[in-house]
Image (cartoon, rainbow, N blue to C red):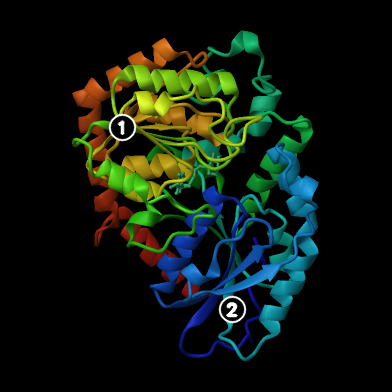
């Protein structure tokens, strides 16, 4: 546990300040800023320390103070497709600038006193910094609880030989972690597997050593995992999600959202559209891209597809699409570079979400009762997809390669499955209830606020 702040630290009346430090990726910035809004609406002043790499637009959040630090990343480092290498270098290069910045903020007596630091779990170096500065540190883990429990089991998975993953064992069940199969374990391709183990193990270790842990999830969705975590982690645990449903907030998108997504959806029939998006990091090959395109075209259903620049390896944007592809669909397909996803998912025209199962996308879909086609790419997405298809049973997983015929069938099956849609709507209701007065996330948030107030 981190040291408590000195007992004699003066606590003035009025608002108190929280310093938040997000990991600079879209799927981490969104939940951190949503959390900032939730805490701000509960009476705290918010300061966001951010890297110069991938930072949100401060003018969208005028009620927060943004303080940049120089991350010192070279252009090559910042554009490294090996995510693990990038995370490792961020965790090295940010230490000094972050510590200097936080020390300066703490010394500034003209502002409200700082109560605690809230940092992303994948910035484990912040534990030692907070300890040196005698500031309590709470961790926000932006992924799901169920996948975190698997990350926490990495030492066992290594010891039992389940990881590194061997192709001959992909379909085997992992006896220690039902219902996961070997192929659902949260790994990622990297040039240096040891660096992956280091990132995961230090995330888990320094989370355990924090003063508390916040989740963008709700008790009813992940109760078994939360119970397992409570056994193993002797710290207060606060599942207060879904964050984005507490109240509407301004966007923290790093890419401009294309509003034509909504005007196009407005012209479609209820529950008819497949929304397709693979988040902010995942990449696919040109062949996979074309199978997806033809699978969507052959499904004969309308689709809204986010093709982020950089999604297709080796292409800038839509160059691999055959000439006239969209025109031949006569308005049945709409492609954008980035969509206002939360708005899209609650649009009545959307009937299914073909997703990579990043945790934010998964939660956003669960909260709107939209069934999913799951195509996980790496790490927690693999676990999330298994839970969506096998535990919550609100999606089907595309497995064993992308092929247009299989895609067409999966789309048809999902769009026709009334029972699955019914279950999805039940989860939506549970998510809503958790936020109402007396609901699990509502109560957990009250506990979090009282807890922070004890610092
Ligand atoms: C990353 C990891 O890939 C994921 O596994 C982890 O759980 C979180 O960090 P990312 O790939 O970006 O996240 O996916 P996701 O977690 O789904 O976050 C994407 C966010 O961008 C969502 O909040 C989504 O609403 C938003 N988004 C996505 C848009 O606003 N518009 C889009 O067009 C696509």
Give the SS element for disc 1: loop
Per the rendering, the mark at residue 121 is none
The C terminus is located in which quarter? bottom right
Give the SS element for disc 2: strand
Q: Quadrant of residue 135?
A: bottom right
Q: Quadrant of residue 409?
A: top left
Local crowd at mark 1 within 10 Å, few (<14), some, or many (≥20)?
A: few
Q: Residue 252 in the image: state x and y as whole percent.
A: 49, 59
Res. 345 in view: yes
**Relative to 154, does residue 140 appear above or below in the rendering?**
below
The N terminus is located in which quarter? bottom right
Local crowd at mark 2 within 10 Å, few (<14), some, or many (≥20)?
A: many
Reading the chain from its start, which is encountered first: label 1 or label 2?
Answer: 2
Q: Residue shown at 79%/59% (left/top)?
A: 72
Q: Residue shown at 27%/39% (left/top)?
A: 369
Q: Would residue 174 appear left or right of 131 to someone viewing this image?
A: left
Q: Nearer the viewer, residue 280 or 110?
A: 280
Q: Would residue 75 appear left or right of 240 to someone viewing this image?
A: right
Q: Nearer the viewer, residue 454 or 319?
A: 319
The residue that mark 1 highlights is: 331
The residue that mark 2 highlights is: 114
Q: Residue 278 in the image: state x and y as whole percent.
A: 49, 35
**Relative to 7, does residue 317 appear above or below in the rendering?**
above
Q: Would residue 84 appear left or right of 360 to someone viewing this image?
A: right
Comparing labels 1 and 2, the label whose residue is closer to the camera = 1
Q: Residue shown at 23%/37% (left/top)?
A: 268
**Relative to 375, does residue 251 appear above or below in the rendering?**
below
Q: Residue 140 in the image: state x and y as whole percent.
A: 54, 55
Q: Quadrant of residue 439?
A: bottom left
């Amino acid at each position: 546990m981190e040291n408590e702040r000195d007992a004699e630290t003066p606590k003035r009346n009025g608002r108190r300040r929280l310093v938040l430090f997000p990991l600079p990726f879209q799927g981490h910035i969104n939940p951190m800023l949503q959390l900032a809004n939730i805490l701000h609406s509960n009476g705290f002043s918010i300061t966001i320390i951010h890297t110069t790499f991938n930072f949100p637009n401060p003018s969208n959040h005028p009620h927060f103070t943004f303080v940049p630090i120089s991350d010192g990343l070279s252009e090559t480092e910042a554009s490294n497709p090996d995510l693990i290498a990038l995370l490792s270098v961020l965790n090295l290069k940010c230490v000094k600038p972050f510590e200097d910045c936080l020390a300066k903020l703490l010394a500034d007596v003209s502002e409200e006193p700082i109560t605690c630091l809230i940092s992303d779990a994948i910035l484990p170096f912040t534990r030692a910094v907070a300890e040196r500065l005698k500031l309590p540190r709470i961790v926000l883990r932006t992924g799901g609880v169920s996948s975190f429990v698997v990350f926490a089991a990495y030492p066992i998975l290594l010891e039992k030989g389940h990881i590194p993953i061997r192709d001959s064992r992909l379909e085997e069940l992992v006896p220690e972690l039902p219902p996961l199969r070997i192929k659902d374990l949260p790994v990622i391709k990297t040039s240096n597997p040891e660096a992956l183990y280091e990132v995961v193990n230090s995330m888990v270790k320094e989370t355990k050593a924090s003063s508390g842990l916040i989740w963008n999830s709700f008790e009813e969705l992940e109760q078994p995992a939360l119970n397992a975590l409570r056994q193993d982690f002797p710290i207060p645990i606060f599942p207060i999600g879904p964050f984005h449903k507490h109240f509407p907030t301004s966007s923290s998108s790093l890419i401009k959202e294309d509003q034509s997504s909504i005007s196009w959806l407005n012209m479609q029939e209820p529950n008819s559209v497949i929304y397709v998006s693979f988040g902010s990091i995942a990449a696919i090959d040109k062949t996979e891209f074309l199978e997806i395109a033809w699978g969507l075209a052959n499904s004969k259903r309308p689709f809204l597809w986010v093709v982020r620049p950089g999604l297709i390896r080796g292409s800038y944007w839509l160059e691999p699409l055959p000439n006239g592809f969209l025109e031949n669909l006569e308005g049945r397909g709409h492609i954008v570079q980035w969509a206002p996803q939360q708005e899209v998912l609650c649009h009545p025209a959307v009937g299914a979400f073909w997703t990579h199962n990043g945790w934010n996308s998964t939660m956003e879909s669960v909260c709107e009762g939209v069934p999913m086609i799951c195509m996980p790419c790496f790490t927690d997405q693999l676990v999330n997809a298994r839970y969506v298809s096998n535990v919550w049973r609100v999606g089907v997983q595309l497995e064993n390669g992308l092929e247009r015929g299989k895609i067409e069938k999966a789309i048809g099956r999902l769009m026709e499955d009334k029972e699955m849609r019914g279950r999805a709507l039940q989860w939506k209701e549970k998510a809503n209830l958790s936020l109402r007065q007396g609901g699990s996330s509502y109560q957990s948030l009250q506990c979090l606020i009282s807890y922070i107030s004890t610092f």
